[in-house]
Image (cartoon, rainbow, N blue to C red):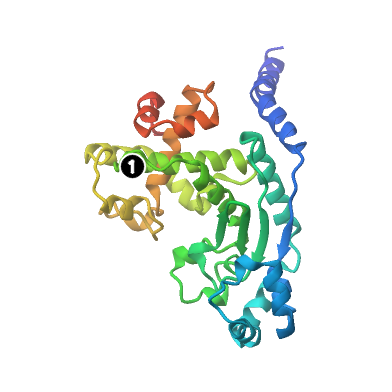
Amino acid sequence: MRKAFFIILPILWCFFSCAPKDRTEDTIAKIPIDLKISRFDQEFAQAIPQDIPNLKKKYPFLFPQQFADSIWIAKLQDTLQHELRDEVQVSFSRMPQEELEIASLFQHIKYYFPSFKEPQAITLISDVDYQNRIIWADSLLLIGLDNYLGADHKFYAGLSKYIRADLDRQYLVGDIAQAFAKSVVPPPSDRTFLANCIYYGKELYLKELLIPNKTDAQKIGYTDDQLGWAEANEAQIWRYFVERELLYSTDTKLSARFLDPAPFSKFQLAFDNESPGRIGRYMGWQIVRAFMAQNNTLSLTQMLSLPATEIFEKANYKPKK
């Protein structure tokens, strides 16, 4: 009997702890959404000069008025553009997995933000404008597919390794979730390092809810090894921040060292090259997670509006050792 008890106990624990989450996901999966993905990249690739007026009428927001039609006709005939289009077509001739993931993302957004109205999603070629690979502007969602061809793609050869690592289709839906998060997470209420860490922590916590089927590494844009390093060194990172009195510092250099995209975080110690960039975002995520674990009756939108100091004080954050 004792042996059976120890087998059943984990099953019961999983039932009671997992059931609410499963019920939430079942509810979300039934939410109707209106997803339309327009393949402007393919339409433009197949166009001839005579098609430009119709494309401008259909997609006026993609054709700034200050540019004459001759600019777009030249682009149709440009050999580099042809190569870009061909490579995108090879990888994204169809997008069944991405369509499913975007649909699920929209369902999750609508669950947590009932007034959400699905934007018109449009795929395009952005000339590898990786800093603006996703643009979410009110009713428009622009997706630059040429930024998701894989880290080793020849188009990215001149980019730094840490930038290339993000240019993979596994991060596409996460980038869309992050673009949405930026529209609903209020900016930091002050200029302290802690406030900025928690701002990004809110974004990541929101992504955690919106794309639950992605791994934590994919949500933050780390490799599995980078996430493992952050988890293994969480206590040491926290001690470093506390002992050097960085939390309430307003030194703008801290963003470049610990928050901005970078090949590694800059502790100015021997192990820097082993660390992933943006480690401050990871730490902010853990603080927000701790806060929500302590205050699980609080709604998501209530948490997003709270100042960083209140979240930190009530989180009782204790890093993993």
Q: Residue at x 47, y 46 (%)?
A: 228
Please give left or right for residue 201 compared with residue 194 in the image.
right
Task: Depth check: give the residue in front, 305 or 220.
Answer: 305
Question: Residue 171, percent across and down?
Answer: 58, 56
The count of marks equals 1
Secondary structure beneath dot 1 equals helix
Residue at (31%, 40%) from the top-left corner? 190
- Where is mark 1, residue-wise? 237
As drawn, which residue projects farthest toward the top? 1
Image position, residue 134 (x, y; %): 56, 59
Residue at x 74% of width, y 44% of height: 33
Image quadrant in which you'd find residue 241: top left
Q: Where is residue 50 in the image (x, y as percent from the top left)?
A: 74, 84
Above or below, 84 relative to 166:
below
Q: Is residue 204 left or right of residue 271?
A: right
- In this picture, is 199 found above or below 13? below
| Residue 89 in view of the camera | no
Q: Can residue 71 be seen in this view?
A: yes
Q: In which quarter of the image is the C terminus?
A: top left
**Disc 1 marks which amino acid?**
Ile
> Closer to the camera, 294 or 54?
54
Q: Which of 86 and 51 is in front in this view?
A: 51
Q: In which quarter of the image is the N terminus?
A: top right
Q: Position of residue 54 (x, y in %)?
A: 73, 74
Label 1 neighbourhood size at 10 Å, few (<14), some (14-19), many (20+)?
Answer: some
Work out whether 50 lies above or below 255: below
